[in-house]
Image: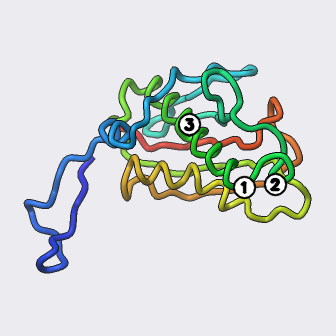
Amino acid sequence: MIVHRPDPDDGGISPSAITAFSPEQAVANLGIVLPQAPKPVAAYVPARRVGNLLYVSGQLPFVHGKLMTEGPVPSKVSPERAHEAARQCAINALAAARDAMGSLDRIKGVVRVGAWVASDDGFTAIPQVANGASELLVQVFGEAGRHARATVGTNVLPLGASVEVEVLFEVQ
């Protein structure tokens, strides 16, 4: 992936400012150690490639095999903690993508994110919770991490999780 960095002198892009960008390196720079790709909890595969698209199934906020948050937002889980859980879902999606592709460096960018938040009636800050995933993907992929997105509030998610996130990547 090539990233164009603006030249601070003229506000444009200088040839020397074009550098190779590695999502693998970005993950390391963020201090993230990707876990083993989470195993499916039902009859599906964690990721499926079709042409130049990699569909990563909905990921729950597992850390060391346990859900980091359970129950609805905000009565059982604070919006801030749910934001962290959405970030963890994205980390797990990256693990599934790496497992499928061999390296995150084979991913050109993020096309779409779908986020579901188990929420109490009247809770409307669902997009802010989903930002936990979206922000991380932009940190990892730079501009290529900007994506279309849908966020949905629901009364319950698999295994009682507070958040679930799916990701559609464009791959090489």
Q: Residue 55 carries which label?
A: 3
Going 19% across and 78% down the picture, which residue do you hit?
11
Q: Name the residue under label 1.
A: 79
The amino acid type of the residue labelled 2 equals Pro
Q: Is mark 3 on a helix, strand or loop?
A: strand
Q: Relative to 96, is 170 on the left or the right?
A: left
User: Closest to the observer: 153 or 64?
Assistant: 64
Distance from Cα at disc 2 to Cα at disc 3: 30 Å
| Residue 93 sits in quarter | top right
Is mark 1 in CB contact (under 8 Å) with mark 3?
Answer: no
Is mark 2 in CB contact (under 8 Å) with mark 1?
Answer: yes
Callout in the foreground (1, 3): 1
User: Closest to the observer: 21 or 54?
Assistant: 21
- Residue at the outermost right position: 121
How many numbered discs sit on the rendered protein? 3
Callout in the foreground (2, 3): 2
Q: What element carries label 1?
A: helix
Q: Position of residue 55 (x, y in %)?
A: 56, 36
Q: Relative to 125, is 26 on the left or the right?
A: left
Going 52% across and 28% down the picture, which residue do you hit?
96
| Residue 18 sits in quarter | bottom left
Going 37% across and 58% down the picture, which residue do you hit?
143
Going 33% across and 36% down the picture, which residue do you hit?
24
The amino acid type of the residue labelled 3 equals Tyr
Q: Mark 2 points at which residue?
A: 74
Number of residues whose C-alpha sits closer than 10 Å to that of mark 1, classed few (under 14), some (14–19) or many (20 or more): many
User: Closest to the observer: 78 or 130?
Assistant: 78
Q: In the image, is residue 63 above or below residue 77?
A: above
Earlier in the chain: of badge 2 and badge 1, it is 2
Q: In the image, is residue 88 above or below residue 3?
A: above
